[in-house]
Amino acid sequence: MTQPLVRVEGLSIETASGRPILRDLSLTLGRGKTLGLAGESGSGKTMTALGVIGLLPAGLKTTGRIVFEDNPLPDANDPAWDDIRGRRIGMVFQEPLTALNPAMSIADQVAEGLVRHRGIGWRQGRRDAVALLDRVRIPRAAERAKNYPHELSGGQRQRVGIAIAIALRPALLIADEPTTALDVTVQREILDLLSELVRDEEMALMLISHNPGVLSYATENLLVLRHGDCVESGPTRQVLTAPSHAYTRGLLEAIPRGSHRQRRLPMEGR
Amino acid sequence: MTPLLDIRNLSRDYARPGFFGKRERVSALRNVDLSLQPGEILGLVGESGSGKSTLARLAMALDDPSGGEVLFEGENLFALPAQALRQRRRHFQMVFQDPFGSLDPRHRVGRIVAEPLHLLSPRPSTAEAKTEVARILEAVGLPQDAVGRFPHEFSGGQRQRIALARALITRPKLVVADEPVSALDLSVQAQVLDLILDLNEKFGTAFLFISHDLDVVEYIADRVAVMRAGEIVEMGPAATVFSNPQHAYTRSLLAAQAVFTVPEMQD
């Protein structure tokens, strides 16, 4: 049997003062598969992602291990990360405007990783960047490549963020609330693009969202986190339609469906 | 019945620098008509850039229109002398999306919530202000000891309760809420939505509830208006607009949202 791409084994994270952020989390993610991490603020979903990409804030105590492509991931600050982060694991952030460099054209930002890691020149890098921008469906990519981030719409900026993340053809793409700031029609386009990349490039996707609708649409498997604990996991549809844990059930009951005149949302605090 | 709020033919243009120093006019709002009855919850939906927030600011007389009028209880707010407008402000208040940015972090909650009381005349005494703060904190479900604490000590949902307390302390007839639950977790969103429904019922406060989230608006609103590119393309009872949308744009918005419908739980 082939090994999963990512295997998180008993990952625990706590603050320097001993407050737990994540408790004994285990998960696996296969090549070309999609996994959703669901949970509210403070649930530990972003910390899980930052752990996998080796970007946990300094001062946190971490135990457990993460095996990626059959090797344990190195400790933070290990130079070995340079060959993993960006190359084998790409990351897309919620707010592309803060993740992008405002003073650099989008072609140069996409080309930067290619030039650094592939040993190609800037001229070739920019040509490849245009192909990537076209790949993520930036219209008239050759012209738009010279634009700066502020000249693009929110959806197009997120496409640029995705182009940067996939430039080196990573095996794993981590997307942390990639569509949260976007209008619903644009959300769908971005999620369709991510699904297409998963299919065509055999990339695995770890999608973090507080929005069950987004996770329902774009993931095969789902893991629900609450205050640093995984409360349940399984096929997305099963978790959403037949949750085994009261917390998941409560979360799903908080989704507005129809008018309050038909059904009031539950009021109990969680 | 005289509407509480009657927006007539309201337009707002902005100047934007164009090529060669020419200034282009950009129309953020075009000939909008909208009215709100006392005690009604009107949902205003639309995508980003549709003009929802521009409309909100004009309805609160926080900005001047390029044309048209905003009548509050029959009086055009833009024709009122400054002093008279100031006296009317106790009757219409606003709540914003970001409960971090809209509460002054240097002030204690008691002071933040009491702030709009200066709009009352005669101005309440310190003792009266204290009573009013206690009354409104209870109404929004915050503990009385909140008065001595700072905004950062509260969660996002509690901060939105503070913002609602501040908006409601002058017993306004209208609250304009601009994306009040968009930054909140689902369970907290449910609590704040139900708080708004309770306050609407208890005090008869009308709400202009602005959101990009159609599910949220369908849940809370009596009537709904759909905006696109500075215009209202459809308006009607929420039950009708959501079950039988007339405008192609409303239909496309509903279709887009339907993709993200979470399958119902089995019992």
Image: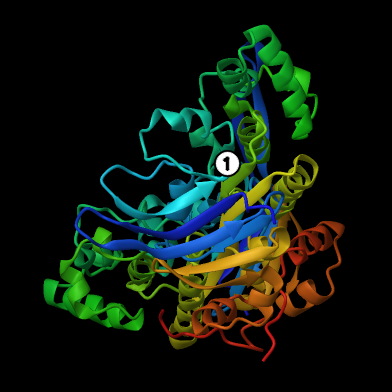
Q: Nearer the viewer, residue B179 or B236?
A: B179
Which residue is the extreme one toward the bottom? B267
- Locate the C terminus of chain A and report the quarter of the image it occupies: bottom left
Q: Nearer the viewer, residue B256 or A42?
A: A42
| Residue for point 61% across, 60% down | A36
Determine if residue A63 is in view: yes
Q: Is residue A205 left or right of residue A86?
A: right
Residue A124 in the image: x percent, y percent? 70, 11
Dot 1 falls on a residue whose secondary structure is strand
Whether B74 is drawn above or below A208: the answer is below
Q: Is residue B14 left or right of residue A191?
A: left
Count residues near mark 1 (Cα–Cα under 10 Å), then give few for <14, some for 14-19, many for 20+: many
| Residue for point 38% across, 51% down | B82
- The residue indicated by pointer 1 is A92
| Residue for point 33% across, 81% down | B141
Which residue is the extreme one toward the front? A1
Q: Nearer the viewer, residue B133 or A123?
A: A123
Residue B133 in the image: x percent, y percent? 24, 75
- Amino acid found under the numbered disc labelled 1: Val
Residue A84 in the image: x percent, y percent? 52, 34
Whether B167 is drawn above or below A111: the answer is below
Q: Nearer the viewer, residue A179 or B12?
A: A179
Q: Quadrant of residue B244?
A: bottom right
Residue A246 in the image: x percent, y percent? 51, 85
**What's the coloring here?**
rainbow
- Locate the N terminus of chain A and report the quarter of the image it occupies: bottom right
